[in-house]
Amino acid sequence: MSHEYLKFCIIKMIEMELKFPTKTGRRSLSRSISQSSTDSYSSAASYTDSSDDETSPREKTQVNSKGSSDFCVKNIKQAEFGRREIEIAEQDMSALISLRKRAQGEKPLAGAKVVGCTHITAQTAVLIETLVALGAQCRWTACNIYSTQNEVAAALAESGVSVFAWKGESEDDFWWCIDRCVNVEGWQANMILDDGGDLTHWVYKKYPSVFKKVRGIVEESVTGVHRLYQLSKAGKLCVPAMNVNDSVTKQKFDNLYCCRESILDGLKRTTDVMFGGKQVVVCGYGEVGKGCCSALKALGAIVCVTEIDPICALQACMDGFKVVKLNEVVRQMDMVITCTGNKNVVTREHLDRMKNGCIVCNMGHSNTEIDVASLRTPELTWERVRSQVDHVIWPDGKRVILLAEGRLLNLSCSTVPSFVLSITATTQALALIELYNAPEGRYKQDVYLLPKKMDEYVASLHLPNFDAHLTELSDEQAKYMGLNKNGPFKPNYYRYDRCSKTTHHDFDYVQYTHFYCNVV
């Protein structure tokens, strides 16, 4: 055999191996790709954790570079990756960074000890680090067992924030993490930042004495605000609370625009579904529902809406959506999406009547909207097909595709736009500053909205991103309208939409008032 022919054969064998690798070759190639993915830290790794380490973080002893072990995360070694994620988020959260730069010299939160329970993502990390820059000490945990970005939690722990969270916590882990944030020797919170009310509930239940030093609660979700009003109505709310959820900058931007984009992202990542021609029912036509319906309709889905509120129902009709009862249409639906903040919106009876392949998911904060517990029965089989995607199989072979076990879809299964979260995070930061620095007696043991002027300030911080230029009132125009040239430009009862809640003035702040009307 000639030397040239031998060389030719070797080259061909190498080419064949690259085209059709042997089992050994495939294993080698797989290891190579896996290592490459780990090194490059693709952003998808946040949501498909490929770690083989199944040990519970509670059973590990981890220490950051400063020697502290006052945290519990999946893997502290992911901190560098998490830091890069945070830096990327900062680029689209310039308004929050601007607030940080403007106020960090004054340290308006010096002495504040903030315990927080929110989604732990790159965007909330920017908020947490802003609070630290403004003088606060922070301890943090997650409000959702699926939404934590492990690498971001690691980066926060490395920076010195006591964070207790990881993706895929059990229910027991969830409450353990909250307890570790609250119950610590030599440190007691004087401010609470909550998302959903679980942290507030835990403190009331286990450590009510903590409220003797707490100056206020800041709450950003429908569910959490509802809980606060229940406490207030029962006379059990013992500190002032700021309702961020119903601030204009939260309702009209986070709830509407964020969900308009993230609903599609979450559904695509989990199911690869095509929306054109699909029959979809969206339960609830508040700001979240409006965002979801708008996005789905734009991609060709045939969307109908369920509603209990005649005003929101009329809005849906005039926006071109048919308003129906769920039990009237559930058999025909390809997707059922809840976003009401209520409980048992989709019941076992509805689930039994769904057609094969129907996708069921929730865009509300709480996991109460879909009766998932009713599906954990012996006659039904659960099959995990990918991360956060379960096929629930009926005895006749019918499959319902359940996403994130009925928990919040967008933050459990995808990401959300950093810019929109900058608006909410800036509002939260200002609410904390307001409550922490308010003179004694300004805020009673009640639930309040942010003053309109503060909403406008948050909006103004974000306008430079669009190179937007505001028109200024002349003195004559301002006098004619009865306005200050510098704002606020709307009365406090003006809520920027047609089905908003009512507020009233109370000196230099706004107190949220809700009332009940019985129509006979």
Image (cartoon, helix red, strand yellow):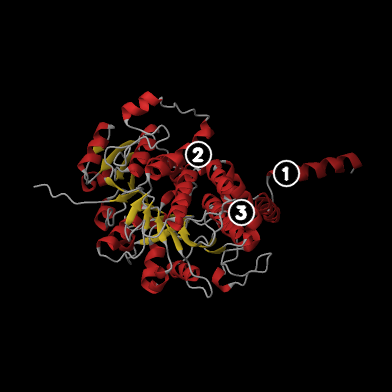
Which disc number belongs to residue 16?
Answer: 1
Looking at the rendered structure, the kind of residue marked 2 is Leu
Q: At numbered mark 1, what does the secondary structure look like: helix, strand or loop? A: helix
Q: At numbered mark 3, what does the secondary structure look like: helix, strand or loop? A: helix
Lateral position of residue 232 relative to residue 206, left or right: left
In the displayed structure, 31 sits above or below 481; it is below
Give whichever of 108, 499 is nearer the camera: 108
State how many labels appear: 3
The x and y percentages for residue 63 are 65, 68
Mark 1 surroundings within 10 Å by alpha-carbon count, few (fewer than 14), some (14 through 19), many (20 or more)? few
The answer to whether the residues at label 1 and label 2 have Cβ atoms under 8 Å apart is no
The quadrant of the picture occupied by the N terminus is top right
- Residue 242 quadrant: bottom left
Which disc number belongs to residue 461?
Answer: 2
The x and y percentages for residue 388 are 46, 55
Looking at the rendered structure, the kind of residue marked 3 is Gly
Q: Which mark is in front, 2 or 3?
A: 2
Q: How far, Cα to Cα, is label 1 from label 2?
A: 59 Å
- State whether residue 398 appears in this view: no
Q: Residue furthest left?
A: 520
Q: How far, Cα to Cα, is label 1 from label 3?
A: 40 Å
The answer to whether the residues at label 1 and label 3 have Cβ atoms under 8 Å apart is no
Q: Mark 1 or mark 2: name the one nearer the start of the chain.
A: 1
Q: Mark 2 or mark 3: name the one nearer the start of the chain.
A: 3
Residue for badge 3: 82
